[in-house]
Image: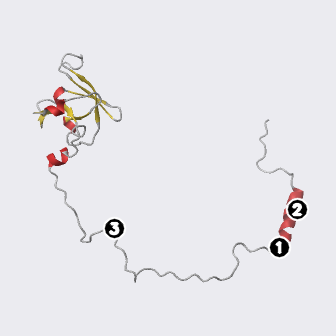
Amino acid sequence: MKIIEKTDTFPSHQYFDEVEEKFLKFTPNCRVLPARHFNEPHLHFLLKQRYEPGEHKHFPNGGFEICDLSGGIYNFDLNEVVVHPFHLNMMKYFSVSQNINKEKISTGVKGKRGRPSKDPSERKVLQEYVPTGGKRGRKPLDPEVKAAKEAVLAAKKAKGTGKKGRPKKQVS
């Protein structure tokens, strides 16, 4: 399969040439790969409709209607679309054909990634818990202070109107 770019028209467009037969067996809603997106194989396009020459007024030479996952519809000529290699279970097609050299960067230490573990001598030493025997929680008030607070609250209640919260809206 070769990709040829036609530059005699504006805008220039790409199309496939010498395509193997297995890439031309289209089924309804199969995943397809347009020629102009060949370098981005993880884009997802689905075949909506295939038109033979003279079958549709907008495709006099034949063509494809293709939709993407967001609902956009694109039109291509018959020689611009093939069945996606991932649809044919050829998962390593692009990595083999592009011959990408991937280099591993090594720190020289085998094992887990990230910050190396500390030596036991550098770690914090937890101190032993020593019970103090003290009581937990909030300490109770002195009886004199408690009586004074209750007297202030009782005085507020006697003065008040008995209503709490936000006042009612008055309609005028």
For residue 131, side relative to residue 63 (left or right):
right
Q: Are marks 2 and 3 in contact (CB under 8 Å)?
A: no
Labels 3, 1: front one: 3
Residue lying furthest right: 158
Residue 84 is situated, as x and y percent measured from the top left of the image, at: 22, 37
Q: What label does residue 114 carry, if any?
A: 3
Q: What residue is shown at x 24% (from left), y 19% (from top)?
A: 58
- Residue holding disc 1: 145
Judged from the image, the secondary structure of the residue bearing numbered disc 1 is helix
**Amino acid type, label 3:** Gly
State the residue at coordinates (20%, 29%): 25
Q: Amino acid at mark 1?
A: Val
Q: Where is residue 18 drawn, in percent x and y?
A: 9, 33
In the displayed structure, 160 sits above or below 60; it is: below
Residue 49, horizontal then vertical, whole percent = 27, 24
Q: Nearer the viewer, residue 137 or 58?
A: 137
Upstream in the sequence, badge 3 or badge 1?
Answer: 3
